[in-house]
Image: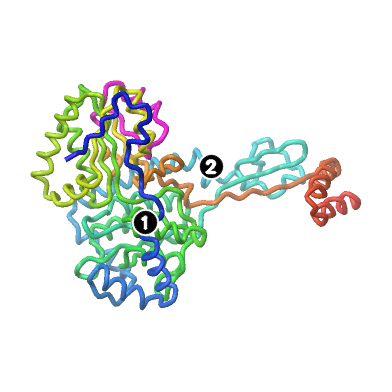
Amino acid sequence: MLRLIDLRGCSDPAASLPRPKRPEEMPQDAVREIIAAVRAEGDVALRRLTRVYDRVEIDAIRVDPETVKRSREAVAPELWDALSAAAGRIEAYQLQRARTMGIGDLVSSSGSPSGSGRTDSHQEGTAFFPDLFARDGIAVATRRAPVSRAGLYVPGGRAKYPSTVLMTAILARVAGVEGIALCVPPGPDGDPPVETLAAAAIAGVDEVYRVGGAQAIAAMAYGTESVPRVDVIAGPGNVYVSVAKQEVAGVVGVPGAFAGPSEVVVVADGSTAPELAAIDLAVQAEHGPDGLAWLVTWSLECAEAVGAALDEVVATSPRRDDLEATLAAGGYTALVDGPSEAIQVVDLIAPEHLELLVAGAGEMARRVRNAGVIFCGAMAPASVGDYLAGPSHVLPTNGTARFAGALSVIDFTKEMSMVSVDRDTFGRTAGVVATIATAEGLDAHAQSVLRRRDRA
């Protein structure tokens, strides 16, 4: 079920590994047609596209807020409690991360951000900018401010994803976003899953819309009669959703990662229980088409044992069809010479999820350069990260872990700086500014400082 790629003795493993899909292999033309339709027709296009792609007729595009509130009574009490427990842990982790990044920190107006108590004129107004750099009479105070509206996408179809609501909406709420909109594909009855609505209630989502696919991304980016436009769009989805986010980037903010179909690399050795490696490969593969599931090992015996265990997992899984389809297209075993070569292969794949089911997992993790999230040891499966560890499970796929990481509170903010200059410093530095501006042929830039210096 896993195709074997024997890299032992290979000097250039990159040449032997299947590569992520290139842009020209993505459904860009189809996505562009969907976006154009939504921009031109608004709600009419959303209803038509929902009928075509989701095979359901919808009238009201927004879910009644009272329906969201009543979801607590509609789900099992143990699920509500589990979602609440997960939400609490996610929020605690994200609040700590926000504090370390200076998000939401307001300093007292009675003193300067640096705590020095100085009231120099060039610091006027910096009291609510917690990050202050002051040198030679020039002060630069910086803070991060939340966007006004965030648009979140949660997939539907093959499964229900209340966890993704928590892993996106809580981050936006911690960042201080005022309006959080959620798009979810409708089920056969025309409504999103009640489990997803329950998570929306717990996470404090303000608006829920029964629309999915690329059309949902277009609606949030450009706005329709029912869906007000947002400032940032985040959340995972199929390849159509991911390409749509790339298409609207610049119209709205879109985090840098390609958050597409699920991926996992499991690194195993002779100490690994084959059934644990096998089930963890299945965890991500059961999400469905276009995903990747890799086993990387330097033990042929391990590769064979995990392969046999995976066959058993697939044969008894209620999602057997999805598993077989994903593994047939994207299931691999990379056989390497040793741990160092395993890390080299991991960095080339740049997986969304990396599980190190090996002796010395912590040491190996420190050597990995490219992965969305790393799970160390047999007791840290990716499922823990998917539901409650704390970091968002919205992670980079399709090789984008080379330059991007997990969705973060910072993705719902933007940086603002305030610059002030005292009078004496301005007189000393105006010449520097004027000299550079003149060299660039920008006379007005030079005059803006020279005329001020002459008036000082």
Q: Which residue is mark 1?
A: 26
Quarter assignment of residue 112: top right
Residue sitting at x 39%, y 30%: 368
Q: Residue 271: give x, y in percent of width and height.
A: 20, 22
Q: Secondary structure at mark 1?
A: loop
Question: As shown in the figure, which amino acid type bears the numbered disc 1?
Answer: Met
Q: Secondary structure at mark 2?
A: loop
Is residue 38 shown above or below 305?
below
Segment tinted magenta in the rendering? 358-379
Counting residues from the start of the chain, the first of labels 2 and 1 encountered is 1
Left or right of 109, for residue 33:
left
Determine the CA span between mark 2 and mark 1. Answer: 38 Å
Quarter assignment of residue 386: top left
Residue 207 appearing in the image:
no
- CB under 8 Å between callouts 2 and 1? no
Is residue 135 shown above or below 70?
above
Asked whether residue 252 is drawn in magenta, I would say no
Q: Nearer the viewer, residue 51 or 452?
A: 51
Residue sitting at x 35%, y 38%: 349
Q: Residue 213: give x, y in percent of width and height.
A: 33, 63
Q: Nearer the viewer, residue 199 or 55?
A: 55
Q: Residue 336: give x, y in percent of width and height.
A: 29, 26
Q: Nearer the viewer, residue 42 or 180?
A: 42
Question: As shown in the figure, which amino acid type bears the numbered disc 2?
Answer: Gly
Label 2 neighbour load within 10 Å: few <14, some 14-19, many 20+: some
Q: Residue 171: give x, y in percent of width and height.
A: 41, 49
Residue 90 appearing in the image:
yes
Q: Which residue is mark 2?
A: 102
Q: Nearer the viewer, mark 2 or mark 1?
A: 1
Is residue 130 shown above or below 37?
above
